[in-house]
Image (tube, helix red, strand yellow):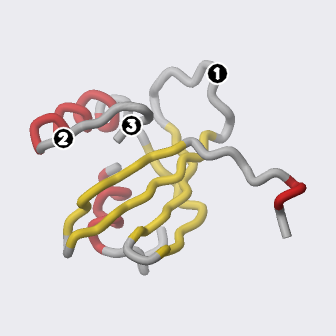
């Protein structure tokens, strides 16, 4: 893992918003983590990270004991971390599609 990532992002990835769902508040976030991240043993293999102003952007290959029917292999999700001091203020996770060849430099 890239140790240059800000501490809250490293902590999240070490421990491991979900697509089209929103969780707000410690109790809702804890329930989501227990049910869908910890319970399904989700792991993240960071493949790329970069910063754009106050947003830390992390691409990661996801794996775990969840239903993978219809998912690409590997499943790469992009995590957009907005930080507030030493905390994650917002996290958006997107299954981005690769840049089409016609749009690449």
Left or right placement of residue 41 versus residue 35 in this view = right
SS category of the residue bearing label 3: loop
**Residue at horizontal 57 percent and vertical 48 percent from the top:** 61
Asked whether disc 2 touches disc 1, contact meaning CB atoms under 8 Å apart, the reply is no
Compared to residue 47, the image places residue 35 above or below, namely: above
Q: Residues within 10 Å of mark 2 (few under 14, many from 20)?
A: few
Compared to residue 67, the image places residue 91 above or below, namely: below
Q: Where is residue 95 shown, x and y percent of the image? A: 57, 42
Residue pointed to by mark 3: 18
Asked whether disc 1 touches disc 3, contact meaning CB atoms under 8 Å apart, the reply is no
Q: Quick one: label 3 or label 2, which is nearer the N terminus? A: 3
Q: Depth-wise, is mark 2 or mark 1 nearer the camera?
A: 2
Compared to residue 54, the image places residue 66 above or below, namely: above
Q: Where is residue 40 shown, x and y percent of the image? A: 37, 30
Tell me the tag on residue 12.
none
Residue 25 placement: quadrant: top left
Q: Where is residue 81 shown, x and y percent of the image? A: 37, 61
**Residue at horizontal 59 percent and vertical 61 percent from the top:** 47
Left or right placement of residue 91 versus residue 69 in this view = left
Give me the C-alpha separation between circle 3 and circle 2: 12 Å
Give me the C-alpha separation between circle 1 and circle 3: 17 Å
Left or right placement of residue 30 versus residue 79 in this view = left
Residue pointed to by mark 1: 70
Residue pointed to by mark 2: 24
**Residue at horizontal 68 percent and vertical 45 percent from the top:** 97
Q: Depth-wise, is mark 1 or mark 3 nearer the camera?
A: 3
Q: Depth-wise, is mark 3 or mark 2 nearer the camera?
A: 2
């Amino acid at each position: 893992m890239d140790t240059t990532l800000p501490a809250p992002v490293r902590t999240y990835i070490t421990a491991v918003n979900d697509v089209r769902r929103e969780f707000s508040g410690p109790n809702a976030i804890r329930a989501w983590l227990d049910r869908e991240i910890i319970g399904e043993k989700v792991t993240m293999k960071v493949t790329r990270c970069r910063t754009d102003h106050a947003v830390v952007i992390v691409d990661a290959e996801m794996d775990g004991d969840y239903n993978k029917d219809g998912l690409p292999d590997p499943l790469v999700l992009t995590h957009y971390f907005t930080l507030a001091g030493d905390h994650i203020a917002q996290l958006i996770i997107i299954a981005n599609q690769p840049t089409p060849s016609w749009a690449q430099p």
